[in-house]
Amino acid sequence: MLTYGAMCFMVLGMAADTPLGTRIRRARERLRMSQEELGAAVKASRSAVNSWEKGRAEPRNKTVVEDVLGISLDEDAPEPKIPAGLQRMVDALSDEEREALLAELTGRPAGPAPRPRRRGRESA
């Protein structure tokens, strides 16, 4: 049976050896949260969140951060085993479908997909 943690790992795509601060930042960004929003959700300051992401400090209450972000902060946690067939299915999802799946897993509303940047004005 695929666990919530394994599914989040699959969607968020973070390896167990990724630095703690990087895992926090990636998860926060994928949830489209600002540092201020994450800080408010875990009762910490924006500067504390920034320190976690830069690797200068670790969250005092990792459990709360894990719950909000839907990831494990345990450095020794084994990498979840994801069946190859399920991984292929997720890899085949569009960005919008991944957003919808992530929203369903985290209970957060799916935001609009980011718009691609244009390099210059197109002539009419």
Image (cartoon, rainbow, N blue to C red):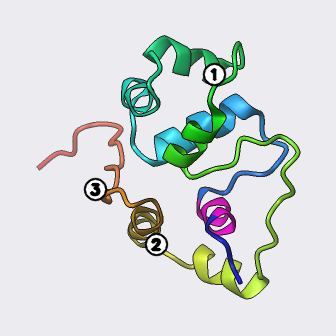
For marks 1 and 2 on the same chain, the one whose residue lies earlier in the sequence = 1
Q: Secondary structure at mark 1?
A: helix
Residue annotated with mark 1:
52
Front one among 121 and 6? 6
> Is-magenta flag for residue 50?
no
Judge from the rendering whether residue 88 lies leftward or rightward of residue 95; answer left or right. right
Residue drawn at x 17%, y 45% is 123
Q: Which three-letter amino acid code belongs to the residue tagged 1?
A: Trp
Residue annotated with mark 2:
94
Q: Which mark is residue 112?
A: 3
The span shown in magenta is 5-11
Split into 4 quadrants, where in the image is the N terminus?
Answer: bottom right
Q: Residue most toward the left? A: 124
Q: Residue most toward the bottom? A: 85
Residue drawn at x 77%, y 34% is 19
Q: Secondary structure at mark 3?
A: loop
For marks 3 and 1 on the same chain, the one whose residue lies earlier in the sequence = 1
Query: Does residue 11 sit above or below 27 in this rendering?
Result: below
Q: How many marks?
A: 3
